[in-house]
């Protein structure tokens, strides 16, 4: 259902995109620093799931409709900004701890990663600009091709972002116990991502 030569050309392009630092990678880095490797992997899984949802919506034609409507684009963007600022506030609101990292409740980093990805309209624009270049209608159902290419990007992103978070968690473990440095680092990352998203232009 996907032309083998097209898939061979797509994989290195997808890997290059996965290795490019972006909001998803920075979010996993922040989770790893603050809450350890398990939180980083859960956040990465949530981001990968959000990416697949974007890809399937694009394949169904819904993302094109959203991207063409300025109001919808801005609503999604500002929801994302507000959510990231809320996460920054929550990071600073934590009480002093007795361990260098915060135990991450099961599922919370996954939900946060999913919401961060879904409320980033840049992902919508990326999917619409990048994926159709590799779609061949004569090769089979378009939605199936979107799903296969999305799975390639999702799996690569899950592995790379998760490993970045695991690497960052070693930094968190080296910081002094009871220190609030971890909270400030995490809040700074989330605030920077919110600012980046707030300045995002549709072009």
Image (cartoon, rainbow, N blue to C red):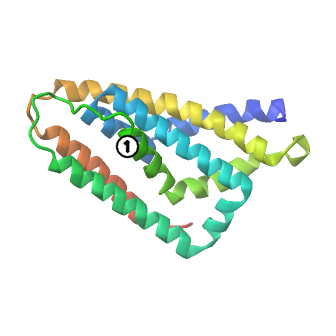
**Residue at horizontal 56 percent and vertical 74 percent from the top:** 70
> Horizontal placement of 157 versus 169: left or right?
right
In the rendered structure, the answer to whether residue 161 lies left or right of residue 144 reads left
Q: Nearer the viewer, residue 188 or 150?
A: 150
Q: For the N terminus, which image quadrant?
A: top right
What residue is at 16 percent from the left and 28 percent from the top? Answer: 100
| Secondary structure of residue under mark 1 | helix
The correct choice, above or below, for 52 with respect to 73 in the image is: above
Residue 164 seen from this side: yes
Quadrant of image for the C terminus: bottom right
Q: Residue 63 in the image: x percent, y percent?
A: 65, 60
Measured as percent of width and height from the top left, residue 117 is found at: 48, 49
Residue lying at the far front of the rendered structure: 106
Percent position (x, y) of residue 165?
36, 31
Q: Label 1: few (<14), some or many (≥20) within 10 Å?
A: many
Residue at mark 1: 27
* Total residue callouts: 1
Q: With respect to residue 191, does 3 lie above or below?
A: above
Looking at the image, residue 100 lies above or below residue 181: above
**The image quarter in which residue 141 lies:** top right
Q: Is residue 56 above or below residue 165?
A: below
Residue 199 in view of the camera: no
């Amino acid at each position: 259902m996907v032309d083998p030569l097209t898939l061979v050309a797509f994989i290195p392009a997808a890997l290059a995109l996965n290795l490019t630092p972006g909001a998803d990678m920075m979010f996993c880095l922040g989770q790893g620093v603050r809450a350890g490797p398990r939180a980083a992997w859960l956040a990465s899984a949530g981001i990968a799931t959000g990416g697949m949802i974007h890809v399937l919506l694009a394949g169904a034609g819904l993302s094109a409709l959203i991207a063409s409507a300025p109001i919808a684009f801005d609503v999604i963007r500002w929801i994302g900004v507000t959510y990231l600022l809320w996460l920054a506030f929550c990071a600073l609101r934590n009480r002093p701890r007795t361990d260098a990292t915060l135990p991450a409740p099961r599922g919370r980093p996954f939900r946060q990663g999913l919401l961060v990805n879904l409320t980033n309209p840049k992902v919508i624009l990326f999917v619409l600009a990048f994926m159709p270049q590799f779609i061949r209608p004569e090769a089979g159902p378009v939605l199936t091709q979107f799903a296969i290419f999305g799975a390639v990007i999702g799996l690569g992103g899950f592995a790379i972002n998760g490993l970045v978070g695991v690497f960052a968690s070693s930094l968190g473990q080296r910081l002094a116990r009871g220190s609030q440095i971890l909270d400030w680092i995490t809040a700074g990352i989330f605030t920077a991502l919110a600012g980046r998203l707030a300045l995002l232009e549709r072009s």
